[in-house]
Structures are given as structure tokens and as C-alpha cells.
Amino acid sequence: MNGATLDRGRLAKLLGMLGSAHAGEAINAARHVEAMRRASGLTWAAILDPPARPATLFDPPPPADRDVEQLRRELARARVEADGLWQRINELTAENERLKASPAAAAGNDWHAALDAIWEWRDRFQPKERDFIDQMMAYRRQGRAISPAQARWLDQLHSKAETFAAMAAV
């Protein structure tokens, strides 16, 4: 046996057996490993640090300059897309914070307080707005949740009601 035909798979299995809890098995494995090394004519240094394998037809070629340029263009496009996504994330985060701060969009029954404030000025709203206010009162009686779009409209109406209240106080 020479270095080119050293069965590295078998060598690895035998080396794994050196940790066996059975002393006889470990010693037998060590003897086989040494016999394989001797038969190959290699030193342990040559086995543990084999020379680099020559390139074959199956090795992938190094990337061509055009491939590198294409990858650079794709990377630039991906960066632009990532920047756009981060901008959208920031916009959505700001919108989320705005909605959390609005009385109508707050969780639980906090929109009920906004609805109460709006109800006091119901007669000053347009017919379509009054219909919406009535619908929200029905939701409240039924214990239903409101959608984000309804919360936004309720928030706008609440701002209007605050304006009516400020004008009446003058």
C-alpha cells in the first residue's frame, strides 16, 4: 500500500476506536492504524498534512471578471432594495407609534373614551360622519373591536370634536 491508496475512511474509523471503553479494542485499533501507516510507507506527518490535491476537470474555475462584475451589480441592486425596505420599516414604525398615541387606536376600550367625546358634538358632524359614529356606538354595545381604518377615522373625528370643544370654550 502506498500514500495514494491509503484508505483514509478506514483510518478515521480505526482512530475513532482508540477512545473505546474496552482496552483490548482500543489496543487492537492502534495496532491496525500503525500497520496501515507502515504499509503505506508514509510518515505520520505526511498522513496528517497531505500535499495539496492537484486541480481536476471537476474543480470549479475561478470566477471570471464578468461574473465578478455581475455579482457587484446584483449586490448594488440588493443594497438599494434593502435601503428601500429599511425606509418602509421606519415609515411603518412611525405610523405604528402615531396610531398607538391616538385615543381611538389604543388597545382595549380606550376608543370608547374618544367615542364619548365625539358623541357630545354629534350634531355638528356631516351626515356620513354621524352614520359612522352611530355604527361605532353599535360596535361598542355589541362589544366588537374596530379595525385600524375605523380607528384612524375615529381619531380624525375625535380631533374635530376637540376643535368644536375649543371653539365653544372661547
Image (cartoon, rainbow, N blue to C red):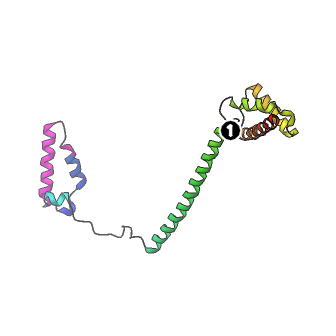
Specify whether residue 90 is painted magenta. Answer: no
- Asked if residue 44 is positioned above or below residue 112 in the image, the reply reads below
Q: Nearer the viewer, residue 149 or 24?
A: 149
Quadrant of res 49: bottom left
Kindly identify which residue carries mark 1. 102
- Figure quadrant of the N terminus: bottom left
Residue span colored magenta: 16-40
- Asked if residue 86 is positioned above or below residue 67 in the image, the reply reads above
Specify whether residue 35 is painted magenta. Answer: yes
Residue at 22% across, 65% down: 51
Q: Position of residue 20 (x, y in %)?
A: 19, 39
Residue at 61% across, 46% down: 94
Q: Nearer the viewer, residue 59 or 99?
A: 99
Residue found farthest to the bottom: 65
- Asked if residue 32 is positioned above or below residue 100 in the image, the reply reads below
Quadrant of res 5: bottom left
Residue at 84% across, 33% down: 122
- Within 10 angstroms of label 1, few (less than 14), some, or many (20 or more) residues? many
